[in-house]
Every structure is written in structure tokens, then in C-alpha cells.
Image (cartoon, rainbow, N blue to C red):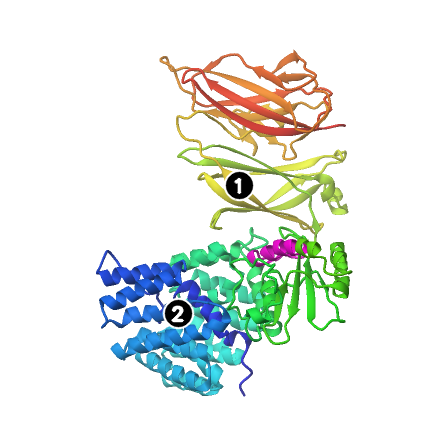
């Protein structure tokens, strides 16, 4: 008995159209090759049109393809491309059918030139699928079956054929064909795989999984990307999201061709950002697609320091719910748009051909709302969703109406007039302005807010896990230094108040273990550094209540922009903190005067050894950048690129300027810079210009001690300036620290 078709077996025709626009696929598993060199004038015109489709600029593309038609009327391919330009365009829904008719006319003209043209037959079948109707679907099936019989490895053609069988209700017949083919040649892994895929789409998950696992174990070299992805979909269908994610990640790691990547994209593009859509279109090689999907999901991973990625499973869980509750009914059109005054500004990622209504698009990106509001005593179905600010997600309130004549739930700019608005005051008191009539100024103000929230909702996607742990307070700081070979040394510092780690077990053991996980990613989420370790912190009797544990990680990497992921865990007390920090690591060119990052330190002692070693010093960082009143401020920095004179000596001067932070009040206390005491100033900044110094090394290591006495200022800005007296060059760097009253 064949189970009902599952959600993953029946992507809507509009869904496929959106994919077609983004990737411009051709039949088979590889994209159409780009034309090389100048070629003929006809080829140049076709290439010009293809480039215009990528923008997309459909009129420019059609002008180029028509020019190619005029140059060679016996070549069917310009006609095929011209038809595709109509197929890929997404005008207002009322004009869409006319575009499909134009596309069909061009493909028929191409077939009159060459009745065997595979591209024309493939794209004609796609148009017939869009036009629907049993006669059109039957003709599409004949075209696709002929293409499959000519080359059974055209995976996209096979997928379209499956969709046609589903639409025609003949999937049982198709399943029987696949079973017969698999039994006829048990040694053909492709026949077995296609039978397993047909079983999966029919809902026979147990047998599908058994066949796929057999393929995975016995034929490890057979399309492991596709087999693992199919296994992932089986488990997602069963709501086993964690196990399915493991297969999904294997599908990326063992991808052998671009087919599974394009299959994955069909499920992922609805939460993609514009730059990701562009990058997917530009990907060509298998490695490009592997890198793309690794970055796509790592970017969304709430716990980036782990190999696991729960965001993938969350997406498929949301996708299952969206297919169940938020499928599009009818079409989005001007006549069923509740935003009649066009107050909303829809961002580019709002996909008019999406298979889900507007509620579904938001649900896919952000999951269940934190609050809902609606009013029953009105003629139009209405609802508002509120998402609370959480993690990196901003607060959002979105309003929907459901048109009686189709189109499903649609965005509206405001929740409506009179009594309709009363329920919304539970989301935000500002909606009370609508309770006594539609004041146009109030409507306009609320529409402006709606546009801000709408842009956030449709250009971002979030998942903030609900950790069943106690969050830790963590203070962060960083500094960068020069390393050999054009590299830079990046030091990340953090500290945790020891009182937050206290428990009976910690007091008894007089120590606490902190699990440390650190990863550093490039901006496209390629991991360049990873470490996991345990930091054991002694907690002895008499430990001050304000004591903190301090730790650091040192990474030598190329200069550039990165993302640091830090996870700190104290398992005994079930305490956790997960952080994601943007990092910019500067370059320190050879033979150029420069100053390292300025490290704000808790203690600096002369000597070597230990984890907190600098050249000639042991430097304990102070991630809070906060000193107690009367406590000396200690600072470490390096000077690079000092020029040497004719006898090989350096000559330089270091000056310091210390200012109260903007908006602060109080009296600047006694200041001692570089050990010089006795300078006192009650207002404005303190400036100290050091004496001329000399040395024999182009790099110098400096320690600065600042005695701030009884200053009541809370924040200080420090600027350090180095003058190279040999090369007549200057370099400056700024930093800040705070003073807290005792």
C-alpha cells in the first residue's frame, strides 16, 4: 500500500520557477558552458543575452537573442534562449500566462528548425508544466520520457518527470517502472537509487532508507552526495532532525557533482540573502558548491564552535510545518493585495513565486512568533505576529490579512481601523492610536514602522536556541601584534567573575573546570582556527568576591576580517555562554612605522614563561578594561618598523595624551606616565612628550604605568604617538579604559 505523497515530493511549479531564475539550469547535471573567446557575432549576441539574464534585464536579453536569431535563422539555440527569457521573467500574475505562451511559441519554432533539439524539448516541457491542464501535462510527460530514454543520467529531467507523474496522479505507475528497472539489473546502482528516491517521495520511508543505506555501505564511491542527501530527507520526513543533519553534512562533504547542490538549493533559497543568491549563481565547480553550503549553514549556526549544526534540522522542521500550514492558495496579485495604498516597501528577497504565503515566508525565516493578536468581530481574517528581541534578532511586529478570493495570508501595513486595532495594544500600546478611526498621520507612522520590521523579517533569518542553562557573564577584549611572514598575531581575552562559578562542588574541590571552545572563521565562514580545551581555575579559601578568572587564546593568521566564535561552559553548574564577535586583524607591513594593538593589563611583570608571555614580560590581560580607583593602569604595546641611522641605531620619541571620556565630569588626578611622577592637572587633557630614546632593534616592546590617584572620572581615552627621528615618520594609536570608584 503506497502512503500519501509527503511534503518533499511535490515542490510547487512556482518553486521550480524561482530556482530556474536563480541558477539558469539546463537539462543534465551540469550548467551550460560559457562561450570562450570572442567567437562569432552570433555567439557574442547569445553571450550578451545570457549575461543580461543574470542581472536580470529581460528586455536587454531578448534584444540580444533576437539579434542572434537574425544572424542565423537555422540555429535553434537563439530561439531556445529567447523562449527562456520569457519563461524566467516574473511579471504581474495577470501577465504570466501570456509570457508562457510567448515562451512556448519560441520553443516550437526551435523544434521546427530541429525536432531533436533536447534543450527545446526540455524547456517546452517546463512551460507545459506551468500551464497545467491534463493535456499539457501529458504532452510534457511524453517529452520528458523521451529525453530520459535518450540519456537516463539527466537528473533534472528525471526530477521533472516525477513532478509530472505526481500532478497526473500516475505516480504509482511511475513507482512500478522504477521497481521493475531496479529488479531487472540489481547491479545497476543508479536504478536502485532512483527506485529508492521514488519510494521516498511516495512515503515508503522504511524501504527507501534500507535501499539507500545498502547503497551507502556497499558502493561508497557511488554518488555519495546524492545518496546522503536522500537519506537526510528520509530522516527529516520522520522528524529525526539531528540524525538527518549528519547525513546532510556528509552530502556536502562528499559531493561529487553539482546535482545535490541544486537539490539542496530548492529547500534553502527561501531563507537566502541576496548576496547568497548571487554567490550560488556564480558557483561553478563542486568545490564552489561545497564551500557555499558550508558557509550558508555555518553562518546560521547558533553554536559555531561545534561541528554539529542544529540550524539545518530547524530549517527542515519549519519547512515541514510551512508545507502543512502555510502553502500558497491562488496567486499574489494586485486585485487581492490588502495593501491597496501601496504603503509597504517589499525588499528584494520577497519572492513572488514562492510556494508559501506571506506568513509562511516569515515562519521559515524566524519560526513561531512570541505573541499573536487578532480580532474576530470583523469581516476579514486578520492576525499580527510579534517577535521579541532575542540574541541578534530585533523586535518585529508584522500584520497579515487573508483575502477571501485567494492569495492566502498577505502583508498589510497597519492592523486596520476602529475595533480591529484594540487587540493589537497587547503587542504595542502605539496601536491604540487607531482605535478611534483611521487617522492618516497615525496610519502613515505605523506603516513606516511596519516597513522597518518587514525588511528585517524578509532579509534576515534567525534561530535563537533556548539553552536550558544559566548564562555566564563574560567580558571580552582583544589586541593584535605583528607576526613573521606577513601574518598577524591575534589575541582574544576573556574573563568570568568567579562568584558566578561558585557552587558547593566548587567550594569542596577548591577548583572549577571551564570548557573552552574557540573557532575563527573568515567572513564567508571558512574555518581557519579551532581549539577545544579545559581551563582549570583554582578557587582557594579567602578568594575575594570581585575576583575574576582570566584566559586568552592566541592565533597567528593572515590579516583580514574574521568572525570569532567563543563558547565557555561550566558543566557542574550547568552554565554556558556562547558569543560571536566580528574581528578585524590589521596588517603590519615590513619597514613601515606602526604600533601594535594596545593591551590593557591587570599585571605586567618582567620575565618569561607561562601562557601570558610577551617578549621579556608576563602580561595578564584585563578584559573588563576597568580599574579600581587608586589602582595603577598598566598597558603593553609594541613599536614596529623603526628605521636605523648610518651606525645602525634607532632614535625615536613616544608621547602620550590622556583625556577624560566625552561627557564625563570630575577631576583628573595625579598622572604618572612611564614612571614620571609629580605632574598634576585639574582640567582638560594631560600630555606627556617623552625624551628621545635609542636602540639597535627595529622593534621595541613598551610598558606604560599610569597612576590616576583619586580621579573621579569613569573613562579615559589614551593616544600613543611614536615619532621616528631617523625616518621622520609618525604613527599613532588610540585606546580607552575605565576607572570605577571603590
Q: Does 136 appear in magenta?
A: no
Q: Nearer the viewer, residue 52 or 537?
A: 52
Q: Which quadrant of the figure has residue 339?
A: bottom right
Disc number for residue 86: 2
Q: Is residue 464 rendered to the left or right of residue 164?
A: right
Number of marks drawn = 2
Can you say whether 3 is above or below 25 in the image? below
Read off the magenta span: 446-468
Residue at 71 percent of width and 25 percent of height: 713
Q: Nearer the viewer, residue 504 or 545?
A: 545
Cα–Cα span, label 1 and label 2? 45 Å
Disc number for residue 597: none
What residue sits right under mark 1 in the picture? 583
Q: Which quadrant of the figure has residue 113?
A: bottom left
Residue at 62 percent of width and 50 percent of height: 392
Q: Position of residue 142 (x, y in %)?
A: 37, 84
Query: Magenta segment, principal secondary structure?
Result: helix
Q: Quadrant of the N terminus?
A: bottom right
Q: Does 462 appear in magenta?
A: yes
Secondary structure at numbered mark 1: strand
Badge 2 density bin: few <14, some 14–19, many ≥20, Cα 10 Å: many
Q: Quadrant of the C terminus?
A: top right
Q: Nearer the viewer, residue 428 or 590?
A: 428
Q: Nearer the viewer, residue 569 or 196?
A: 196
N-term mark: 1 or 2: 2
Residue 33 visible to an observer of this rendering: no
- The reply to whether dot 1 and dot 2 touch (C-beta < 8 Å) is no
Amino acid at each position: 500500500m503506497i502512503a500519501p505523497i509527503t511534503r518533499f515530493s511535490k515542490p510547487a511549479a512556482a518553486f521550480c520557477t524561482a530556482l530556474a531564475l536563480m541558477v539558469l539550469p539546463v537539462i543534465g547535471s551540469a550548467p551550460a558552458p560559457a562561450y570562450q573567446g570572442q567567437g562569432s557575432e552570433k555567439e557574442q549576441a547569445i553571450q550578451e543575452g545570457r549575461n543580461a539574464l543574470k542581472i536580470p534585464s529581460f528586455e536587454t536579453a531578448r534584444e540580444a537573442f533576437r539579434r542572434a536569431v537574425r544572424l542565423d535563422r537555422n540555429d535553434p539555440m537563439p530561439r531556445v534562449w529567447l523562449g527562456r527569457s520569457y519563461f524566467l521573467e516574473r511579471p504581474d500574475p495577470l501577465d504570466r500566462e501570456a509570457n508562457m505562451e510567448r515562451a512556448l511559441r519560441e520553443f516550437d519554432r526551435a523544434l521546427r528548425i530541429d525536432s531533436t533539439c533536447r534543450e527545446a524539448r526540455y524547456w517546452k516541457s517546463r512551460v507545459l508544466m506551468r500551464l497545467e491542464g491534463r493535456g499539457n501535462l501529458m504532452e510534457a510527460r511524453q517529452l520528458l520520457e523521451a529525453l530520459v530514454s535518450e540519456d537516463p543520467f539527466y537528473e533534472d529531467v528525471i526530477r521533472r518527470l516525477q513532478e509530472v507523474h505526481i500532478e497526473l496522479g500516475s505516480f504509482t505507475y511511475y513507482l512500478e517502472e522504477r521497481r521493475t528497472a531496479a529488479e531487472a539489473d540489481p547491479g545497476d546502482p543508479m536504478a536502485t537509487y532512483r527506485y529508492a528516491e521514488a519510494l521516498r517521495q511516495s512515503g515508503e520511508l522504511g524501504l527507501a532508507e534500507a535501499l539507500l543505506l545498502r547503497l551507502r555501505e556497499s558502493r561508497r564511491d557511488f554518488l555519495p552526495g546524492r545518496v546522503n542527501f536522500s537519506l537526510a530527507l528520509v530522516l527529516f520526513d520522520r522528524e529525526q532532525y539531528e540524525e538527518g543533519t549528519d547525513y546532510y553534512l556528509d552530502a556536502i562533504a562528499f559531493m561529487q557533482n553539482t546535482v545535490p547542490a541544486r537539490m539542496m538549493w530548492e529547500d534553502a533559497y527561501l531563507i537566502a540573502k541576496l548576496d547568497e543568491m548571487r554567490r550560488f549563481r556564480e558557483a561553478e565547480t563542486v568545490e564552489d558548491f561545497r564551500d557555499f553550503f558550508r558557509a550558508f549553514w555555518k553562518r546560521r549556526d547558533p553554536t559555531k564552535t561545534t561541528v554539529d549544526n542544529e540550524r539545518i534540522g530547524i530549517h527542515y522542521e519549519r519547512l515541514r510545518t510551512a508545507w502543512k500550514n502555510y502553502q500558497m492558495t491562488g496567486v499574489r496579485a494586485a486585485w487581492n493585495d490588502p495593501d491597496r495604498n501601496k504603503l509597504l516597501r517589499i525588499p528584494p528577497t520577497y519572492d513572488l513565486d514562492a510556494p508559501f504565503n506571506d506568513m509562511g515566508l516569515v515562519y521559515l525565516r524566524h519560526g513561531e512568533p512570541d505573541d499573536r493578536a487578532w480580532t474576530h468581530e470583523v469581516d476579514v481574517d486578520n492576525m499580527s505576529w510579534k517577535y521579541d528581541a532575542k540574541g541578534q534578532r530585533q523586535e518585529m511586529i508584522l500584520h497579515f490579512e487573508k483575502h477571501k478570493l485567494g492569495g492566502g495570508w498577505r502583508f498589510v501595513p497597519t492592523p486596520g481601523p476602529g475595533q480591529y486595532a484594540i487587540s493589537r495594544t497587547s503587542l504595542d500600546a502605539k496601536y491604540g492610536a487607531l482605535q478611534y478611526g483611521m487617522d492618516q498621520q497615525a496610519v502613515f507612522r505605523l506603516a513606516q514602522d511596519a516597513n522597518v520590521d518587514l525588511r528585517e523579517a524578509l532579509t534576515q533569518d534567525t534561530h535563537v536556541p533556548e539553552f536550558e542553562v544559566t548564562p555566564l557573564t563574560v567580558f571580552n577584549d582583544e589586541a593584535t601584534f605583528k607576526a613573521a611572514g606577513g601574518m598577524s598575531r591575534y589575541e582574544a581575552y576573556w574573563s568570568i567573575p568567579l562568584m558566578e562559578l561558585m557552587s558547593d562542588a566548587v567550594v569542596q574541590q577548591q577548583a572549577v573546570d571551564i570548557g573552552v571552545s574557540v573557532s575563527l572563521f573568515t567572513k564567508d565562514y571558512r574555518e581557519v582556527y579551532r581549539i577545544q580545551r579545559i581551563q582549570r581555575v583554582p578557587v582557594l579559601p579567602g578568594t575575594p568576591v570581585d575576583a575574576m578568572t582570566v584566559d586568552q587564546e592566541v592565533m597567528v593568521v593572515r590579516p583580514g576580517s574574521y568572525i570569532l566564535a567563543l563558547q565557555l561552559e561550566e558543566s557542574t553548574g550547568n552554565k554556558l555562554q556562547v558569543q560571536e564577535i566580528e574581528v578585524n586583524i590589521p596588517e603590519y607591513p615590513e619597514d613601515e612605522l606602526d604600533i601594535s594593538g594596545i593591551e590593557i593589563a591587570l599585571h605586567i611583570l618582567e620575565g618569561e614563561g607561562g601562557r601570558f608571555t610577551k617578549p621579556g614580560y608576563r602580561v595578564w590581560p584585563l578584559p573588563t578594561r576597568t580599574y579600581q580607583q587608586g589602582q595603577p593602569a598598566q598597558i603593553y604595546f609594541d613599536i614596529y618598523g623603526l628605521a636605523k641611522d648610518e651606525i645602525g641605531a634607532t632614535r625615536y620619541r613616544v608621547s602620550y595624551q590622556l583625556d577624560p571620556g566625552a561627557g564625563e565630569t570630575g577631576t583628573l588626578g595625579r598622572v604618572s606616565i612611564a614612571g614620571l611622577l609629580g605632574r598634576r592637572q585639574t582640567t582638560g587633557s594631560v600630555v606627556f612628550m617623552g625624551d628621545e630614546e635609542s636602540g639597535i632593534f627595529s622593534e621595541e616592546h613598551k610598558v606604560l604605568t599610569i597612576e590616576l590617584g583619586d580621579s573621579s572620572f569613569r573613562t579615559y581615552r589614551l593616544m600613543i604617538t611614536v615619532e621616528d627621528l631617523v625616518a621622520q615618520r609618525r604613527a599613532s594609536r588610540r585606546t580607552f579604559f575605565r576607572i570605577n570608584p571603590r
